[in-house]
Amino acid sequence: METTALREEAPAESARRQKTRSRLLDAAFDIFAEHGVHAASVEMITEAAGFTRGAFYSNFSTKEELFFALMEREMSMRIQQLRAGVAQYVVPNEDDTTALGDDEVVEIITKVLELQSDDRRWWLVQTEFLLLALRDPAISADFLHSQDAFFAQLTDIVVEALETAHRRFTIAPEEAVRVIAELCANGEARALLSGDERTFPERLSASVPAVLLALTERV
């Protein structure tokens, strides 16, 4: 009987633990974006989440471990959102002999980029992630691994979008996506610095569509 009871309680315990971790990650997202990784303390995160230090350390051994878990969650979630959301913008062309016009191609890719760029906190936390890796060689490899995995998946999505428009990159696809993503990141940084409250498509630099078209060709 006792063994059965323990087995019955395990799923509930696991659900509570996942809920606790999720609330800590949600709080950390806000705290890291507002204060930065180094200025943020465990106390600030646990207070925002409504937990004690004990709850924190029962789920994460260090603040850095929490940060990596947050980045992994956000990257995975955004890739899932992209894959789910891109279907409404990327529709296979019924006429296989007719390529979409340049304006239509730019609109499709802009929608893809917008799905990945919907939260300014994300850009702030990504910057914190980069700074953390630059300052600490011990985590540089993990940083590069997570970034490479994210861009590999992002590239697959962008390439799929281009294929429906009968276009392809003229250089290595992942390098092309990194160039475009870097332009978007610079634009987001300028928007944050200047207090620009326009939507992502409105803020999108004219250079992004120009570079996109310059790096692709009709097939």
Image (tube, grey):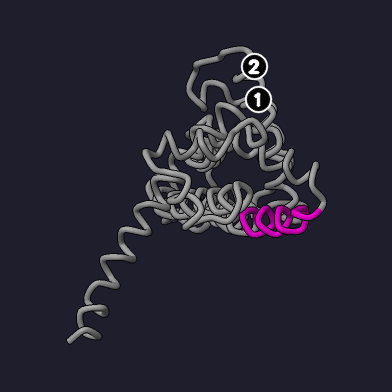
- Residue furthest left in the image: 1
- When the figure is inspected, residue 70 is found, relative to residue 46, above or below; the finding is below
SS of the residue at dot 1? helix
Residue type for callout 2: Leu
Q: Residue at x 41, y 56 (%)?
A: 94
Taking depth in this image into account, of 157 and 64 the one nearest to the observer is 64
Q: Would you say the residues marked 1 and 2 are in contact, meaning their CB atoms lie under 8 Å apart?
A: yes
Task: Name the residue tied to disc 2.
Answer: 193
Q: Which percent across, then down, holds residue 113?
A: 54, 39
| Region rendered in magenta | 138-151
Say if residue 7 shows up in the picture: yes
Q: Which mark is residue 22?
A: none
- Amino acid type of the residue tagged 1 in the rendering: Ala
Corner quadrant of residue 144: bottom right
Q: Is residue 32 left or right of residue 30?
A: right
Q: Residue at x 79, y 47 (%)?
A: 136
Q: Is residue 77 left or right of residue 178?
A: left
Q: Residues within 10 Å of mark 2 (few under 14, many from 20)?
A: few
The location of residue 170, given as percent across then percent down, is 75, 52
Q: Quadrant of the N terminus?
A: bottom left
Q: Position of residue 69 (x, y in %)?
A: 55, 54
Q: Is residue 143 magenta?
A: yes
Residue visible at 71% across and 37% down in the picture: 182
Q: Is residue 109 magenta?
A: no
In the picture of the structure, the residue carrying the numbered disc 1 is 189
Residue 162 in view (yes/no):
no
Q: Residue at x 58, y 56 (%)?
A: 61
Instruction: Give the quarter of the figure containing the C terminus.
Output: bottom right
Magenta stretch, main secondary structure class: helix
